Structure formats: structure tokens, C-alpha cells
Image (cartoon, rainbow, N blue to C red):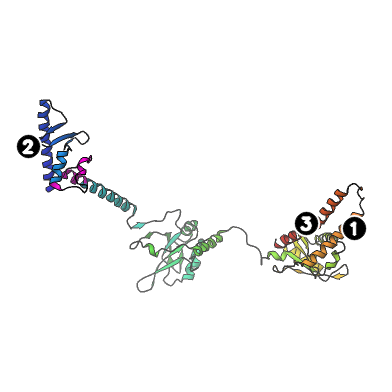
Amino acid sequence: MSGDSDGNREFHEQLRLQELYGQRRDDGDDPYTFVDPEDGTVYDWDHDKKAWFPKITEDFIAAYQANYGFTEDGASAATEDPQPEKPKDKEKEEKKEEEGTESGTTKEEKMKGEKRKAEPGWFDIEKDKNTNVYITGLPPDITPDEFVELMSRCGIIMRDPLTEEYKIKLYKDSDGNLKGDGLCCYLKVKSVGLAERLLDEYEIRGYRLHVEAARFELKGQYDASKKKKKNKEYRKKLQQQQKQLDWRPEKQGDARKRHERVVIIRNMFHPSDFEEDPLVLNEYRDDLRSECEKFGEVKKVLIFDRHPDGVASVAFKEPEEADVCVNTLNARWFGGRQLSAELWDGVTDYQVEETVREREERLKGWSAFLGDEKTQEVKPKAGDETTEVGQKETEKEKPEEMEEKKEMEEKKEMEE
């Protein structure tokens, strides 16, 4: 009621001022200012707010300070251009408007939040995503294994990713006895329609079944804390379930491992065989490839020239081809040596790392080998000394580069 009385008082005050304003205008004075004859207060017309407000003058400030107290700056405050003071009634109205806008925004936000939250109740899974089947009319003595066997006729039953158990349920009453209905969750949606066509009206021990797509109801309120977290293990097991739908044909018999395609041959040479003539290594490789191509398609041939047992490896396309090679070359004689052939175990690394001293000796022998070949070529002219020195330097570098490149290739081939 106090708010209404304040509003009426202000309204009547504005009417009174408006009447006085008309009288002043008839007298020819300033149409936007007038003096109240009761207390002598000068008023200005505010065009924006469409209302009269007291004019701020030094006399008005002095009267205001006399009634309500001085400012901190004292007399200096009167010399400054002060901001116009708002009437108390106006301030109250503005505060009410601000409170109203704040409460209005909060109410709108609450309404938006309430609209987002759906009321708990009945719900149905979309037909194209529902993989659950509800069965009634089951025998009271049916077992979970028998129920799984029955429902497996129409598709793959989903397993729980965490417990690995089939996602089925046989409902029981309060006494723990079977009620004769159950639920089955398939892996694919098409299994639901297949179960409705094949198992509906199907009889088991005199009991007629009824099969339909399952419908669910929300019991109680939703509790987010009870929701299962989809961790890495959960997603991994879901991917394993999806592999059950793979249409690729299964391999017949026991699958052979990849390393069983590689044959290891021992006692084929001695590392000293390549010291005098390193190019003999290529001859060994070519001879071994041509011999093994009789057993099947050869993918790769490696000669481990520094291995003390004289080891070589041959990779075939199929494990059966490697079996034929082992049966043929094992205990066979080659170059006065009896060979030993077996399948690679997939672990042993036959690459032998040489020491620094062995490397230096090998490079010296390689340089000597290249030097012998150089003497057979035509000697350059006497004036070409600089070119001869440059050629010798490059020839010294070639053996090292070639050997390093060769070692890198052998390591890569073994890793493959």
C-alpha cells in the first residue's frame, strides 16, 4: 500500500507542476523552467523523462547540505559541477525495476532449465535400434542354458562386455519362482524380426510362446551415479563382439605363423670364404635362390657372411613351400659341407656385429682387392697426378660406404 501511496503522491505532484507550468507560460516566462511559489524551488523540464526536476544551483546545494549533511570535500564540493540528485521516490522505482529484471532473468533461466529436464515416465527404444525381445509362455522349469540355445536360433546373443555373460533374463516372482517370461538382447536388430517370425507361437513341452519386441519403463528416478562408465576395456570388448559379424571365411585347420615361412640353412660356408674375394657372396646368394625356387615362390634370400655357422635364410610365400625346402635340403651336401635346414623360430637374430679390429682388417682386404683390380686398368698419364690422387681418395671411401650400406640393408631385411 505504501508503494501505491508514493506513486499517487508523485502523480499528483506532477499534475500540480504541470498546472503551474501552464500558468508560467501564459505570463511569457521560460517555458522549461519555473519557480514553485510555495517554497521557491526552481524546476527544469526533462525532455527524456518527461518530468520536472529541481534545478541544481548553489542555493539548492546549500539547502541540501544543510538538511542532509556536508560532503567529505566540504565547501569545495559546492564549487564543482555536481551530478543532479534523483528524488527518493525515483530511486526506489529504479531499484524495483533492477530487482525485477534480475528476478525476471533468473526466472527465465529456471524455466529454460526445467524445460530441458524431461519428466520421468514411459519410454520406447526406436524400432531401428531395439535389439531386445520379450518372450512369454516359457515353461516354468526352463534353464538359462536352454533359453540361450532357443534364442540363438535367430541370431547372435549379445554378451555383457564386463562379465562376458549372455544378456538374457528370466523373470521371477517374489518367492523366486520363474514367472514364464524372459528377455533376450541380440547383437543385431534384424534378429528381433527373425525371432518374431520363427519363435512366435512356437511350442516347448506343451507351452506356446509369444515373442515381441521389448518395451521398457522407467522405475523410480534416474540416477547418473549408477550409470556405467564406458572405459577403454568396455569399448575394447564391444569391438570384439562386433568381430563376430565378420564375413571373412575362417582358416581351415591350425593357422600357420608368419615366421614358419622362413627356412634357416646352416654350414653353407665359412666367413673366411669371402675374405679373398667378397664377390663370392653374390654367387652363393644366386645359387641358393635358384635352388630354392624349385620348391616354391622365393620372397627373399639373406646370407649372414660373418656368422661362424655359415647361416643363410630363405623366405617363401607359403609355409608349405618352406616345409618342402626343409625336407629336401636338410642333411644335403653343398660344396663339401653337409647342410642343416630348419624353420625359423621367429626370435633368433643371426646378424653378427663385427668388432672394430675386424672391421679395419676387412676394409684393408677390401681396399687390397680393389687395388688389384686397379692395376689391371690402363695407367693415367704423368701429367694427371692430381686426378690420380683424387681417384685414390674416392676409392678409399667407396669400400666403407658400400659396407655400411650393406649392413643397413641386412638389418632391415632381418627386421622385416
The answer to whether residue 84 is seen in the rendering is: no
Q: Nearer the viewer, residue 276 or 208?
A: 276
Compared to residue 177, the image places residue 27 above or below, namely: above
Residue pointed to by mark 2: 38
- Tell me where residue 364 appears, x and y as whole percent: 84, 62
The answer to whether residue 216 is seen in the rendering is: yes
Task: Residue at 89%, 56% (x, y): give it.
Answer: 373
Few, some or many residues within 10 Å of mark 3 (<14, 14–19, 20+)? few
Question: Disc 1 residue type?
Answer: Asp
Q: Quadrant of residue 93?
A: top left
Q: Quadrant of residue 11?
A: top left
Q: Secondary structure at mark 2?
A: loop
- Tell me where residue 122 appears, x and y as whole percent: 34, 57
Question: Disc 2 residue type?
Answer: Glu
Quadrant for the C terminus, please.
bottom right
- Are the residues flagged by discs 1 and 3 in contact, CB closer than 8 Å? no
Q: CA distance from mark 1 to mark 3?
A: 19 Å
Q: Is residue 284 left or right of residue 69?
A: right
- Of the numbered discs 1 and 2, the one sitting upstream in the chain is 2
Magenta stretch?
67-94
**Count of numbered circles in the view:** 3
Residue pointed to by mark 1: 372
Question: Disc 3 residue type?
Answer: Glu
Residue 78: say if magenta.
yes
Q: CA distance from mark 2 to mark 3?
A: 115 Å
Task: Residue at 9%, 29% (x, y): give it.
Answer: 23
- Of the numbered discs 1 and 3, the one sitting upstream in the chain is 1
Picture disc at residue 401: 3
Looking at this rendering, what residue extends furthest in the front direction?
75
